[in-house]
Image (tube, grey):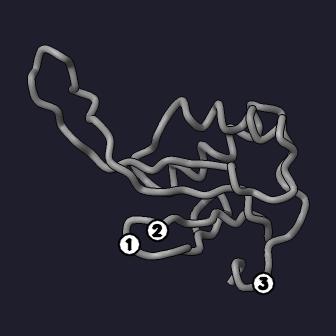
């Protein structure tokens, strides 16, 4: 558990591994580790620095209206995070910035464990 009160539950294995983010007993989003260009990337350098980042998504969250989903997704796409914990904080901040209430339906007990 992290300071935000979120708990992560692994979904899948291998290249398709992602984590559901459970907050106050509800799945509010998913995070996935993926490769990205580093901050030092420019076209003139002829090489890139690859790093791993955490991308958040609310695309598969149940009980979230389409318009609300699009607003939160737009904010989440603006910035990837270097840690799973910072991605969780950013996801909560994205819900707040989009003025969207967290999904009301509780997660199943297997996710909250």
Q: Nearer the viewer, mark 3 or mark 2?
A: 2
Tell me if label 3 and label 2 are in contact, CB under 8 Å.
no
In the rendered structure, the answer to whether residue 24 lies left or right of residue 34 reads: right
Q: Look at the picture and state if 25 lies above or below 29.
A: below
Q: Which residue is mark 1?
A: 14
Q: Which residue is mark 2?
A: 17
Q: Residue at x 71, y 85 (%)?
A: 110
Check residue 40 in the rendering and tell me which mark sits there, or answer none: none
Cα separation, mark 3 vs mark 1, equals 25 Å
| Near-viewer residue (44 or 84) | 44
Looking at the figure, which quarter contains the C terminus? bottom right
Q: Position of residue 78 (x, y in %)?
A: 54, 29
Looking at the figure, which quarter contains the N terminus? bottom right
Q: Position of residue 5 (x, y in %)?
A: 68, 63
**Among all residues in the image, which is located at the extreme top?**
44
Labels 3 and 1: the sequence-earlier one: 1
Q: Which residue is mark 3?
A: 109
Cα separation, mark 3 vs mark 2, equals 21 Å
Q: Residue at x 64, y 46 (%)?
A: 91
């Amino acid at each position: 558990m992290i300071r935000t009160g979120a708990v992560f539950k692994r979904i899948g294995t291998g290249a398709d591994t992602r984590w559901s983010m459970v907050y106050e007993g509800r799945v509010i989003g998913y995070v996935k580790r993926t490769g990205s260009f580093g901050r030092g990337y420019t076209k003139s350098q002829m090489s890139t620095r690859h790093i791993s980042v955490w991308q958040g998504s609310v695309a598969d969250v149940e009980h979230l209206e389409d318009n609300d989903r699009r607003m939160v997704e737009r904010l989440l796409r603006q910035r990837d995070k270097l840690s799973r914990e910072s991605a969780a904080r950013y996801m909560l901040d994205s819900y707040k910035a989009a003025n969207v209430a967290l999904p009301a339906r509780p997660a199943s007990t297997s996710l909250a464990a």
